Amino acid sequence: MKNTKIFIIIFFIFLFFNRYALPENSDVLYQKIDLFSEVLEKVKKNYVDDVDQAEVMDAAINGVLQSLDPYSAYMNQEMLDIMETETKGAFGGLGIEVGMEAGIVKVISPIDDTPASRAGIKAGDYIIRINDNQVQGKTLMEAVNLMRGPVGTSIDITIRRKGEKKAIVFKIVREIIQVSSVIAKTIDNNIGYFRLTSFNENSSQQLKSRIDEIIAENEIDGFILDLRNNPGGLLSQAVRISDFFLDDGEIVSTRGRNRKENRKWFAKKGDQINGKPLVVLINYGSASASEIVAGALKDHKRAILIGESSYGKGSVQSIMPLKNKGAIRLTVSKYYLPSGKSISEVGVTPDFEVEEENEDFAINTSSDNQLNFAIKLFNG
């Protein structure tokens, strides 16, 4: 009976595969089902350690999703709870946003003032080992789970970095990550500077409050919106924040296979900074929602972009609940800028390409060449 249930599960997995990947040929489908059953039986009988078949099936489901793209994945109930906590702006861990590239876990960006950023982890780093565990061959969610653990415990992260011949090992202590979305200050008494570190549920309200405060207290000639190393977050927040600086026009659209995923978002009348000059800073760590904001403001010629080309994460994932109280995160559409261009795997190109020479720009702004370039634009 148990084997029959397993076979039924396998059948539905390959039925999914058949619909999206295999030719419409029932013979091929049944051959693949037989092959998978044979592989599973050999693993059960011959693998060096006992294998939990439930875990094997979870891995098979996740394998189907991960084969589609780096952002689709299976989440059990614990993973789903963690993800929901993260979008609320407080969670435990290292403070690092990761993705998958060619089967390797890649750092999208470290979050400011978190264990990962203080240790020196950089956008573009490849994580090859977590403690004693090789990362290659694991799914993204498996790698993320390895990085999580009790607050106060340490973890060794081994990375490969472009330009470095040897692997680099970082010992990092896990913390509760409190994400304050907005850092604000005035520069030279006449420039409003806002650093947005993420797009969580509170980001737009926090940004609006800080904009209002700075405008009320200073004679501001222009504004800088810093989206560097911002890994993104909620689409709704990207739309609201873009709308802060636009009077009208399209902000972003999504296009998917299902018609219900084809949507457009537009700006409402009312520019929060009254049309004053705006500069946006981006780099390789700017992803997803950051790219929507930067791309929309650039396409409408509302802002000048300075820095480096962004990451290129231009797809939309929908969380689809499952009967076991877990969920799948499935890519259902792609983002398109007002110009009609896709962000996916391309990113947003700045108007002025300025390389990031200062590795701790978020802390040591005095030697931040990208920020200084922006200030010079304002001061002529």
Image: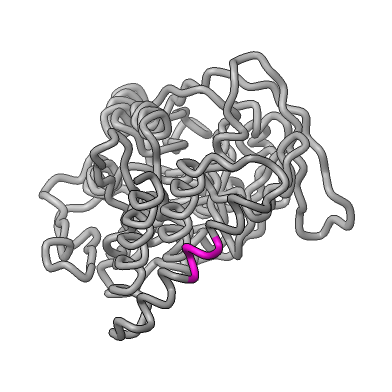
Image location of residue 370, percent across then percent down: 60, 51
Q: Is there any visible trace of residue 378 in the rendered image?
A: no
In the rendered image, which quarter is residue 342 located in? bottom left
Q: Is residue 83 visible?
A: yes
182 over 238 or under it: above or below: above
Judged from this view, the residue extending furthest toward the front is 1
Query: Against 2, is 22 above or below?
Result: below
Residue sitting at the far top: 152
Q: Which residues are magenta?
A: 35-39
Residue 52 vs 45, above or below: the answer is above
Whether residue 40 is in magenta: the answer is no
Q: Identify which residue, 239 or 269, lies in the foreground.
A: 239
- Residue 182 or residue 96, whichever sits in front: 96
Residue depicted at 33% across the width and 47% down the height:
328
Depth check, front residue: 288 or 152: 152
In the picture, measured across the screen, residue 118 lies left or right of residue 255, that is right
Going 64% across and 57% down the picture, which residue do you hit? 104
Look at 57% across and 28% down and name the residue there.
148
* The image quarter in which residue 25 lies: bottom left
Residue 309 position, x and y percent, is: 54, 63
**As rendered, which of 223 and 358 lies closer to the eye?**
358
> Is residue 214 rendered to the left or right of residue 347?
left
Q: How many marks?
A: 0
Residue 155, given in percent of the width and then of the height, sits at: 72, 27
Specify how the rendered protein is coloured: one colour
Left or right position of 360 against 98: right
Main secondary-structure element of the magenta-colored stretch: helix
